[in-house]
Amino acid sequence: MTSPSPSCDTRPGKIMLVGIGPGHEAHMTARARSAIQEADTVIGYVTYIKLVADLLDGKEVIRKSMTEELDRAISALDAARQGKKVALISSGDAGVYGMAGPTYEVLFQAGWTPDDPVQVEIVPGTSALNSCAALVGAPLTHDFCAISLSDLLTPWPTIARRLDAVAMADFVVALYNPKSGRRTRQIVEAQRLFLRHRRPDTPVAIVKSAYRRREHIVFTTLDQMAEADIGMLSTVLIGNSNTFVRHGLMVTPRGYANKYDIEQGGETRDGEQRGRSLSTGLLGWLETLQAEHAEGASFEVLAERHRLPLDYIRATLMEPLEAAAPDTLEESEA
């Protein structure tokens, strides 16, 4: 990879790493639009350039193919060294499988620092997982993560370990880059790994081209998902053990039913207190663990019972159980 050559132009340039969201004008932030409008040069993958075509009048436009991410970053730095304002665009968010990371790699290799005359601004956008989730209901209300199935830059064993870990840990998962014309087996392998830990009827939503002209949504299940129409414009949302689909909406409960009896008007359940940790929260669990160990359960048995690492169980039981200060109710908790 060659570094851009500096220019004698003393006017400071700027690189704006712009996340344009799903691509529909209504879901692009005001700052994303203004960043593109104020740019002298706009650089991006050809499909993304088409999505912002109405903002490109009078601008230098540099179109790159799907596999030319580093070339896009190099071109952006080269133009900024010439004193230009550059909008380097990504769909979704520039920092989520977007151009922010590759651009910083190129910048650092070229000797750039935050004190450099070339300024860098990241303009956040709505990522695919947010867009797709909004279209299918509320699948991300509890803990979730994102994993890309693309092995173009990441070794498959690394991807497989991550899939297995999150499947076992019961995360809701958004799969990016699930399938392409040449990469057809990765989604099958992901399904196989998830079925080691999840029920076959686990809800799955597949959203293609969210908020774009050819938007398409399919609800299916884990054991059927590999048979669905999936491509590079698709995002696959796999629910956790509590996720359900009702009236065409995919919802992951936050856990209110663990503490409150919704059918009784939201009254707290026996043994629970509003604004305090669950009886099965950390302190309650530690007390249970200590009691089980005192009754004769070995470290090994407890590790298997609670599906936690043996060394973690051993270290936890070796520490004295301390009384905790009362919990403080926070806005996001109940």
Image (cartoon, helix red, strand yellow):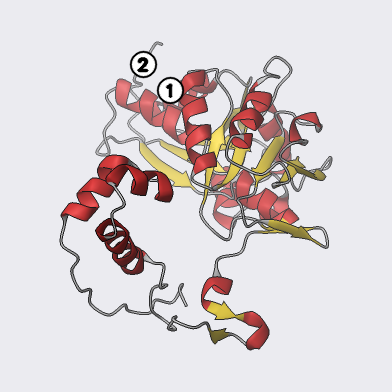
Tag of residue 5: 2
* Residue 277, percent from left and from top: 38, 73
Q: Label 1 is placed on what type of residue?
A: Asp
Residue of label 1: 78
The residue closer to the viewer here, 333 or 277, is: 277
Q: Label 2 is placed on what type of residue?
A: Ser
Please, is residue 48 above or below residue 264 in the view?
above
Q: Secondary structure at mark 2?
A: loop
Mark 2: few, some, or many residues within 10 Å (few <14, many ≥20)?
A: few
Residue at 28% from the left image edge and 48% from the top image edge: 313
Residue with the most extreme front position: 296
* Residue 13, percent from left and from top: 40, 35
Choose top left, top right, bottom left or bottom right for residue 261. Answer: bottom right
The residue closer to the viewer here, 126 or 327, is: 327
Residue 255 as seen in the image, left or right of residue 304: right
Residue 224 as seen in the image, left or right of residue 37: right
Question: Real-space Cα distance between discs 1 and 2?
Answer: 7 Å
Quadrant location of the N terminus?
top left
Q: Secondary structure at mark 1?
A: helix
Q: Are marks 1 and 2 in contact (CB under 8 Å)?
A: yes
The residue closer to the viewer here, 202 or 176, is: 202
* Residue 25, percent from left and from top: 71, 51
The answer, for residue 167, to whether it is visible in the render is: yes
Mark 1: few, some, or many residues within 10 Å (few <14, many ≥20)?
A: some
The residue closer to the viewer here, 186 or 63, is: 186
